[in-house]
Amino acid sequence: MTLSFGTDGVRGAAPEALNPRFVNCLAVAASEVLSVDRWVIGRDTRESGPALSEAVIAALESMQRVAIDAGVAPTPTIAHLAKVEDCAGVVVSASHNPWTDNGIKIFAPGGRKLHDHEQTMIETRLHELLGDQSVTSLPVSSALRHPNPMGSWIESINAALENRTLNGMRLVVDCANGAASEIADTLFSDLCAQVEIINAEPNGRNINDDCGSTNPAKLKAVVQSSQADLGLAFDGDADRLIAVASDGAIIDGDRQLCLFANDMAQRDLLLERKVVITEMSNLGLRQALELADISTIEVPVGDRNILAQLEEGAATLGGEQSGHIVFWDYATTGDGLLSGALLADLVVRSGQPSSDLARDAMLQLPQVLVNVPVTVKSSDFPRKVQQEIQAAQDRLTDNGRVLVRASGTEALIRVMVEAPDERVARSEAQRLADVIQAAMR
């Protein structure tokens, strides 16, 4: 099966599906569609990363483009470079997926993600190139190295904090053995925080392995045992953040967004008092923002959808429960390290423990998620499934919520149910999962 664009670029098993020839063709297609002369390329710490990065570089150079290798770098670093250096960017990363996968994310000049029509044009051309058997893998070439890929990006984070420091803050930072591993200590130490770094020894195969934003249990244990003020966990390419409060409570993307929105509103920094959320955002977040007289703009899951609203000027803050938070005044994509620095700054300015801030931000309704494997990725549900979804929502009334959607990256149907009682949510979610599995196997 040919890989296609999902909610965040192209992603798949490497090298079984995502191999140098595929990446060559994708880079050529992107180069033709975007018609940009200069490109910057970064990657996370996966074993397959160097070979796939070289394939991108070889393809771009075959198109007479200038390819600049930034080496291992967080996704937001590449987006920032694409913005300030007016070039296109490619990140070789599968984000929070296991090491056996890899992916390609593309940024247009200005650091923005691709518009739908650009993505469609690239995908069409990619399939043409893949179907041409005369097109083979291009020879690997040596790229120019970027002299200082992190410099201006770190400066931008300092500017977002208005040059305030984190003096006195005790932080534990989980780098997920990913792209943040080489830079997190420097960033937060330079901000004058007392920093303990964990999971920052990548070996190509341990990225996201029982650590990072998808599994913050170890971070929680270290935060509590060391009596730290805050814990920060990134994913493999460091574009998302899950935090841990001083008492061990998880501060997910919804709770972060609530804290940031209220803080920005109080400082008259929240444009039109609006925040962009996704359909997965907890009902408790919606209720908390409504109480604070902050309105929401709801979009489908995927930070591309959030970014589209921000780019149109509808708001300057948006985010996902998974930890992608976008501060449009400072960045063009989700940036876990920026979010972490701003969250720590918020705690310092408040003078309160992070545990108190997180607890009081919002009342989170129990939310049960069930992933149902299906044979083919599809968002078209049989009539029986549609009827069962409506029946579940009718039983919950306005006190709960049901969301059933196809995954943008995997052959899964994701079932989400919110209810005041977790047992009710779990029961309704499992009932729906059983119906979907029987109808769509």
Image (spheres, rainbow, N blue to C red):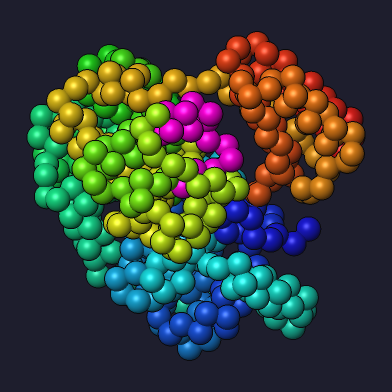
- Camera-side residue of 316 and 92: 316
Q: Magenta residues, as a range?
A: 276-290
Please say if 367 is above or below 322: above
Please say if 253 is above or below 48: above
Image quadrant assignment for residue 218: top left
Where's residue 251, x and y in %?
39, 28
The residue lying at 75 percent from left, 24 percent from top is 394
Image quadrant assignment for residue 191: top left
Please indicate, yes or no, whether residue 371 appears anywhere in the rendered image.
Answer: no
Where's residue 320, x and y in %?
48, 41
The residue lying at 35 percent from left, 25 percent from top is 361
- Camera-side residue of 263 and 226: 263
Is residue 406 shown in magenta?
Answer: no
The residue lying at 57 percent from left, 75 percent from top is 30
Is residue 282 shown in magenta?
Answer: yes
The residue lying at 59 percent from left, 40 percent from top is 279
